[in-house]
Image: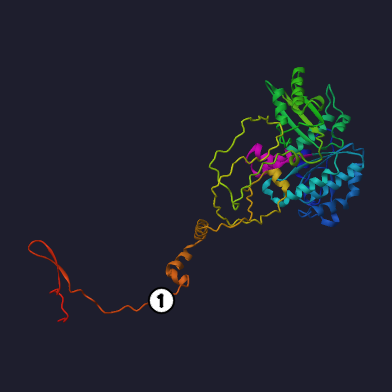
């Protein structure tokens, strides 16, 4: 709802707005004149409660009203929603299916939640996008988390406003390619050629002025938050619209833009381009690019992301240490950044005869696997790489026993130490120590050493200092 209200406030030429919601209060606050209360009987105007199934059932309940509005000479419809909640996630696929069945060119423009909105909301968004993809001609997915990467740590209201702004740019960019006239006009048939049954699309938009405005504008477009994966290579069709203001674009500038796009996209890509005039731009130019037909029905965020190669270290495996040098490959291949490289792990270390004693760790192997794999592909990993442990033969030598003792000692607390110090070790080990009776009789020697006049040492009896009778 917020995104549609923002679009309405900005204005898109020759586009009618309809707002759909299960929340009656949100509808009352909206300035958009055409409103549809979804699931009035089911939700009683209280919203979908963050439940996509309730949003879906609400849209089905109101499907006749939706179809009636869509059937009134509608040629193209934009379905805009923030995915992850209840209403947008559940209702958008139902509305898209109704539009598609009426023969309307249907374009979905949706957002993926910020990471801090939680894994449940992100999972619901992914499931909703998968359902929506089946019922639209073209789908643009905007990753809100990427806005943080580009614009930094925004205030909360600014972050969501920026997301609404990006949604508006997408819808406005596509619609005004058709509605804003120019010398080289792009009409609805051109847009239909590019977007009809095209699956996932990517879009970018950039505005620049001054020197080198042409190259700056197209570079900004190709680095737009709308282009989540920053790559249009492999697209079958590209729709390119160049709009200038008071200072009209030149032929050389048009050539710079089209050549740049062709080089980035590849020689097999068909480019349909047109231009328009918008005096409000002044000396600026606006370049909008839409790329479709990537030969895959999956979302580029999921399919084109190169997964980081994992290194798995087996801590309990009886490894061989290497005192010898590790072999290196003499012939190295240099790849360009754009090339796709198949990476294989090659073990070139030669084992020696010296055995290495593993130190066991109490690793918790039952890790939480509830987070969808797609979340990792969208947002990247936040945890340390997984370390797998396997069972091997336990070492039986004394060194390994010492390691085990050290490991146990590392877990001792102050309380444990006090208990150890207060009780002798032989009692803790339950060792029986026998007490022996020692004789109380004392024996003293009567012999002594003395030195004579010649400094000779003599051994004598009857020590005069000792006697049997004590006084």
Residue 278 appears in which quarter of the rendering?
top right
Observer-nearest of 118 and 134 = 134
The stretch drawn in magenta includes residue 63: no
Whether residue 11 is visible to the viewer of this picture, yes or no, is: no
Q: Magenta stretch containing residue 164, yes or no?
A: yes
Residue 470 image offset from top left, x and y in percent: 16, 81
**Is 67 situated above or below 216?**
below
What residue is drawn where x is 69% and y is 21%?
212
- Report the span colored magenta: 140-165
Residue marked by disc 1: 434
> Is 128 left, or right, of 426 in this rendering?
right
Who's the residue at 62% across and 55% down the image?
Answer: 392
Q: In this picture, is 310 found above or below 451?
A: above
Horizontal placement of 175 versus 393: left or right? right
- Viewer-nearest residue: 347 or 162: 347
Q: Residue lying at the far left in this picture: please name it.
A: 453
The foreground one among 252 and 344 is 344
Horizontal and vertical percent position of residue 408: 52, 60
444 versus 62 height, above or below:
below
Q: Residue at x 80, y 24 (%)?
A: 275
Is any part of residue 75 visible from this angle? yes
Q: Main secondary structure of the magenta part?
A: helix
Residue 299 lies, in percent from the top left, at 77, 41
Q: Position of residue 120 (x, y in %)?
A: 72, 52
The reply, left or right, for residue 462 in relation to residue 194 is: left
For the residue carrying disc 1, how many other residues have a C-alpha within 10 Å: few (<14), some (14-19), or many (20+)? few
Q: Secondary structure at mark 1?
A: loop
């Amino acid at each position: 709802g917020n995104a549609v209200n923002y679009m309405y406030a900005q204005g898109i030429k020759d586009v009618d707005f309809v707002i759909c919601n299960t929340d009656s209060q949100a509808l009352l606050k909206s300035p958009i004149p055409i409103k549809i209360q979804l699931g009035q009987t089911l939700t009683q105007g209280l919203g979908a409660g963050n439940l996509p199934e309730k949003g879906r059932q609400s849209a089905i309940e109101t499907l006749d009203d939706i179809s009636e509005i869509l059937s009134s000479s509608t040629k193209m419809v934009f379905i805009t929603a923030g995915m992850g909640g209840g209403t947008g996630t559940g209702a958008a696929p139902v509305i898209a299916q109704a539009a598609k069945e009426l023969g309307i060119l249907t374009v979905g423009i949706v957002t993926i939640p910020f990471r801090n909105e939680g894994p449940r909301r992100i999972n619901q968004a992914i499931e909703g996008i998968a359902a929506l993809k089946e019922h639209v001609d073209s789908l643009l997915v905007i990753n809100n988390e990427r806005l943080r990467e580009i614009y930094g740590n925004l205030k909360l209201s600014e972050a969501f406003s920026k997301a609404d702004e990006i949604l508006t740019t997408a819808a406005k960019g596509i619609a005004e390619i058709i509605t804003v006239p120019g010398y080289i006009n792009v009409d609805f048939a051109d847009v239909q050629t590019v977007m009809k049954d095209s699956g996932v699309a990517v879009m970018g938009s950039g505005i620049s002025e001054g020197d080198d405005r042409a190259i700056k504008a197209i570079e900004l477009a190709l680095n737009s938050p709308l282009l989540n994966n920053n790559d249009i290579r492999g697209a079958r069709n590209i729709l390119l619209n160049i709009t200038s203001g008071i200072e009209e674009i030149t032929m050389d500038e048009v050539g710079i833009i089209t050549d740049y796009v062709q080089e980035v996209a590849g020689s097999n890509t068909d480019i349909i381009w047109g231009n328009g005039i918008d005096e409000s731009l002044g000396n600026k130019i606006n370049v909008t690019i839409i790329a479709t037909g990537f030969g895959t029905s999956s979302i580029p965020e999921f399919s084109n992301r190169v997964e980081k190669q994992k290194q798995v270290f087996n801590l309990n495996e009886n490894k061989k240490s290497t005192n010898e040098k590790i072999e290196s490959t003499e012939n190295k291949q240099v790849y360009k950044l754009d090339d796709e490289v198949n990476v294989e792990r090659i073990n070139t270390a030669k084992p020696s005869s010296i055995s290495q004693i593993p130190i066991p760790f109490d690793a918790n192997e039952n890790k939480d696997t509830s987070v969808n794999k797609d979340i990792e592909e969208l947002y990247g990993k936040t945890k340390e790489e997984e370390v797998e442990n396997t069972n091997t033969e336990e070492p039986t030598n004394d060194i390994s026993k010492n390691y085990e003792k050290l490991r146990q000692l590392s877990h001792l607390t102050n309380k444990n130490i006090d208990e150890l110090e207060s009780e002798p070790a032989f009692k803790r080990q339950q060792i029986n120590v026998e007490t022996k009776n020692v004789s109380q009789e004392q024996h003293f020697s009567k012999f002594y050493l003395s030195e004579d006049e010649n400094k000779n040492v003599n051994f004598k009896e009857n020590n005069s200092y000792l006697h049997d009778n004590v006084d």
